[in-house]
């Protein structure tokens, strides 16, 4: 049996430092559950790649992440910090594509 590829959804905009810390823990949680996660908001927002504060670049990053998501078996949505507009869009897109959407909470998150 192959390791499932999953698209990780968690907030980014707002308290970016907290949200990045949370997304990294969520990614680790996926690995520890035996999944291979992809979190476009952690990769594409690195310095020199895309600027999430610019609407056109944010949209480009979201589109690219969703394109990668077409190869995923599921979208895993981490909800401890709420569900952002971008996460809702990702969930709708996953459902339209017939991809499983699973809501999760991080074990031990304050």
Image (spheres, rainbow, N blue to C red):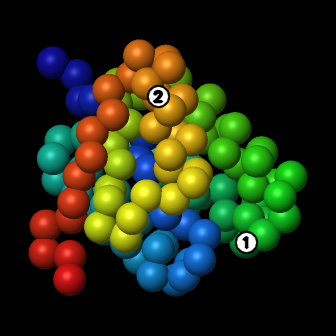
Which quadrant of the figure has residue 25?
bottom left
Cα–Cα span, label 1 and label 2: 28 Å
Residue displayed at 41% across by 16% down: 98
- Foreground: disc 1 or disc 2: 2
Q: Which residue is mark 1?
A: 47
Instruction: Identify whether 19 is placed above or below 79.
Output: below
Q: Earlier in the sequence, mark 1 or mark 2?
A: 1
Note whether 98 is above or below 25 in the view shown: above
Q: Residues within 10 Å of mark 1 (few under 14, many from 20)?
A: few
Asked if residue 86 shows in the view, the reply is yes
Q: Residue placed at 77% from the left, 60% from the top? A: 50
Height in image: 101 above or below 78? above
* Residue 68 visible in this rendered orientation of the protein: no
Horizontal side of 26 relative to 85 (left or right) equals: left
**Element type at mark 1:** loop
The answer to which quarter of the image holds residue 85 is bottom right
In which quarter of the view is residue 107 placed?
Answer: bottom left
Q: Tag on residue 33?
A: none
Residue 33 x, y percent position in the rendering: 15, 47
**Marks 1 and 2 in Cβ contact (< 8 Å):** no
Quadrant location of the C terminus in the rendered image: bottom left
Q: Position of residue 43 (x, y in %)?
A: 59, 57
**Residue 19 vertical placement versus 92 (above, below):** below
In the foreground, 36 or 85: 85
Q: Picture coordinates of residue 56 (x, y %)? A: 86, 52
| Element marked by disc 2 | helix
* Quarter of the image with the N terminus in it: top left
Q: Count all numbered tags in the image, as a single digit.
A: 2
> Residue 79, how many percent across, how many down?
32, 59
Q: Report crowding for label 2: few under 14, some 14 to 19, many 20 or more residues within 10 A (C-alpha).
A: many
Q: Which residue is mark 2?
A: 94
């Amino acid at each position: 049996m192959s390791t499932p590829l999953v698209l990780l959804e968690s907030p980014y905009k707002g308290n970016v430092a907290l949200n990045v810390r949370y997304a990294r823990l969520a990614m680790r949680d996926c690995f520890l559950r035996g999944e291979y996660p992809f979190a476009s908001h952690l990769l594409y927002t690195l310095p020199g790649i895309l600027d999430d504060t610019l609407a056109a670049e944010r949209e480009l990053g979201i589109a690219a992440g969703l394109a990668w998501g077409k190869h995923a078996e599921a979208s895993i949505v981490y909800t401890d910090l709420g569900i952002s507009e971008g996460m809702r869009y990702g969930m709708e897109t996953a459902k339209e594509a017939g991809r499983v959407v699973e809501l999760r909470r991080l074990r031990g998150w304050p």
